[in-house]
Amino acid sequence: MTFSPELEAKFAKMIGNYPPGRQKGALIPMLLYAQDEVGAVTEEVIEEVAKRLKLSRVEVEEVLGYYTMLTREPRGRYHIQICTNISCMLTGGEELFEHACRRLGIGNKGKTPDGQFSLEEVECLGACSWAPAMQVNYEFHYQMTPEKFDRLIESLRKLQ
Amino acid sequence: MANMVTITINGRQITVPAGTLVIEAAKQAGIDIPAFCYYEGFSVQAACRMCLVEVEKMPKLQPSCALPAAEGMVIHTESPKVVEARKSMLEFLLTNHPLDCPVCDKGGECELQDMTFRYGLGESRFLEIKHHADEKQWSPLVFYDPARCILCYRCIRVCDEGLGVGALGLSYRGVSAEIIPNRGDHLECDECGWCIDVCPVGALTSGTYRYRSRPWEMNYVPAVCTHCSNGCKTTLSVRNGEIIRANNRDRSGINGEFLCVKGRFAFDFVHSGERLQTPLIRKDGRLEPASWSEALKAAAARVRASIERNGKAAVIGSTRTTNEENYYLQKFARQVLRTNNIDHHRSGDVITLLQALGGREGALATVQDLYTCDAALVVGADLSQQHPLLAVQLRANWRHHQSPVFVISAGPVREDQYAARSIRAEAGTEADRLEELRADLQARRNLVILYGPSMKGEAVRRLVAFGDSLGIPVKYVCLVDYANSRGALDMGLLPHLAPGYRPVEIPGMTLDAMLEAPDLDLVWVVGANPLEGGRRFVSRDAFMIVNELFLTETAQQADIVFPAMSLYEKNGTVTNVCGEVQRTKAGPKVMGTKSDLEILGLIAAQLGFDLGVPLPDRVFEEIRREVPGYNVPLALIATGGAAPTKPPAVPAEVDAQPELVRSSGDTLFTSGTLGKYSKKLGEVIEAPGRLYQVLVP
């Protein structure tokens, strides 16, 4: 399979960044970028990345299973990650997550039937100073409350 | 000589080469340090933390499997701190372990169980519900129970490093971490089951052994594998006359603990429902069951009649019977039937090699040589598919000693993964490409050359001439197909050569000539299937006696069929591809069968011939006396060792008959007649005959 020209250029540069014989160092970023473009690390992506990095399929799957940011199943258009680690937990992160579950009608790692939203409970997002924090795709939202969450969901729905 | 360092372990001074791992140094001194992930011969993982030791002046406990010995180190392996650490590690390993020992196959030979008895606490402080994951079947032969797994990585390393297959990996994390197979939910690999053997717990279990027995209920019999020619020791676990499993955990043979799918799983043909268990005599055109005495009497009468009327007899011998039986068979042919019409299915041009070597000693490589040689050249063979032990030896030699391997083959082979040079040449033209490797090979201290069945006659002479011209010591291996293919040649199952390759006065008919001869009176086939694929003897009226395990195409045409024992059921010796003699012992019992030696002995006795006592030990004594090269040390053989035979000199004028060399081209998942009757071999997805090709990107 081939990716978009931009991504192909990125991959070419990335693979060249590693000394000969150590190309497999590019595995994690390749999987992540491919996932962003394709929507998930599909069977096809696994085969392709393995081929390009001269790895066996099982070596790719080892990494794929280990990292929770990589997924085989396509996520929602808006992937919501809510932190419930210590700082966020103390400032209402768990309540926020429970509210999100009720509001979206899905559980952890679930996806709404229309495919718009998916939800995931995550560990520290590195935003403790502004806890509780959450992330929608690559965008951060700080000092969240259930009300702010509802407004955010509404605004995202309107964007459709 | 490497730099030596002196260390102190538990108050004892030990001097070892610098760089020796502390766990190994301790072992040399007879001090046992417990470990799960450490596995001799494979890369260091340092994952299980069982081998922690206290080293003075180091603030924390150190994993002894990853700690090189350094001058002046003072180590304690049983101090209170270490014992406490082991206790804690075991408690930790058991947090999610199901403790289902009463139903686990590994119970009784489980390293985790042993260790817990030795160091463990009686109870755990963890009260939480155990994390569980369901058991998975990866292939008909390999099952994985993640709950029992302690993540030592042994299986991953033997598969990847030992075999170059790399079918296993470890994925997910934390409590969810587990071993994953290479095809999503199943395995596609060599199906050798090495991973099952090395598993220190019951996480990997075998499709043939699961829930069948306990280790203490079985007897262990040292047998030599009856399939390919590598001569692996396979220790049969026998209960009530039945083989329950086969492995070689005691590393007693030339193969250490390695076995391929055939050695480990393809023993089930022994107890196949299709085994012949009573003699058959053709009556009114149909093979009918008969008693042993009736069949022996009928066969003896027919042989006597044939001798009296001077009828033409032909004998076809086997590549999977013992040396003793082969020796006795040729004696039977030459002395009782008074004919040199004796041959067998030849699969490698050993004769030309021996001619070219001219009796030179030390010119035949042993299996051990493949692990110690400075370089190896593989010509016209796919070792990992046809000679798995030899492939594993070469790979280990490369891993441990960086000894390069050079390949000249028709297609891609697994050795390409690490070969210093791989040359592709059409079968039969390999010798033309030898010169390209001259400079590389001359730079090595010594060399082992292995060649396959595409190299015969002139090509073998050129190969030896090339080896001789390199100016370094060169040893050779002529690859042959079956467990005693080599022994059949050495024991003189040949129309023109008596045991030890001594020319006979009047050469007899070759196998091809026998099939074509119009005037045969008597044909005796022992453990062979020359009529495979619907062939017929041109002499349709010849009386045919067949000793066989199954009603093969040949046995179906017979007039008398004797139900024979398989190699696993009898005592005797076999000679492997490298010309090493090993003793095999009788394990299982199949009712109604007799060994070929006994059958021939009984017939000879009925006919009034004295061919010597048909007991394996007595015949082997005669072989040691009579067959050049076979005067091997008895003590070595008796204690399960492999004794290399000396290459006898074969006169230059002898016709090696290279045109009769035809390999069956078996793969990892086929094994001639026996393979057809092994259910397990037929069940794996790689079968029949499909090769597992490692991805070579």
Image (cartoon, coloured by chain):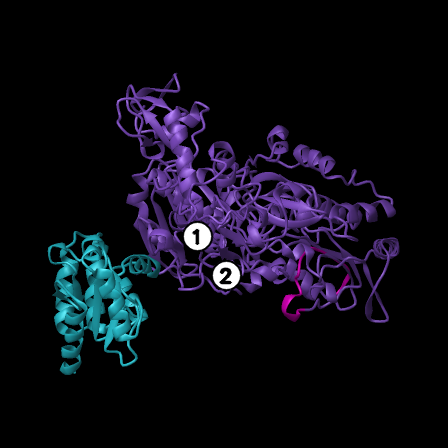
Q: Nearer the viewer, mark 2 or mark 1?
A: 1
Residue at the image point whose x is 59% and y is 30% from the top: B636
**Quarter holding the C terminus of chain B?**
bottom left
- Residue under pointer 1: B129
Q: Residue at x 24, y 63 (%)?
A: A95
Q: In percent of the image, x 16 and y 78: which residue is there?
A: A154
Query: Which sits earlier in the primary sequence, circle 2 or circle 1?
Result: 1
Q: Which residues are magenta?
A: B519-535
Q: Secondary structure at mark 1?
A: loop
- Residue B435 at what x, y percent from top left? 32, 49
Distance from Cα at disc 2 to Cα at disc 1: 30 Å
* Left or right of A104 on screen, residue B514: right
The chain containing the residue under callout 1 comes to B
For mark 2, give the secondary structure. Answer: loop
Mark 1 is surrounded, within 10 Å at the Cα level, by few (under 14), some (14 to 19) or many (20 or more) other residues, namely few
User: Which residue is nearer to you in this view: B500 or B196?
Assistant: B196
Q: Amino acid at mark 2?
A: Ser
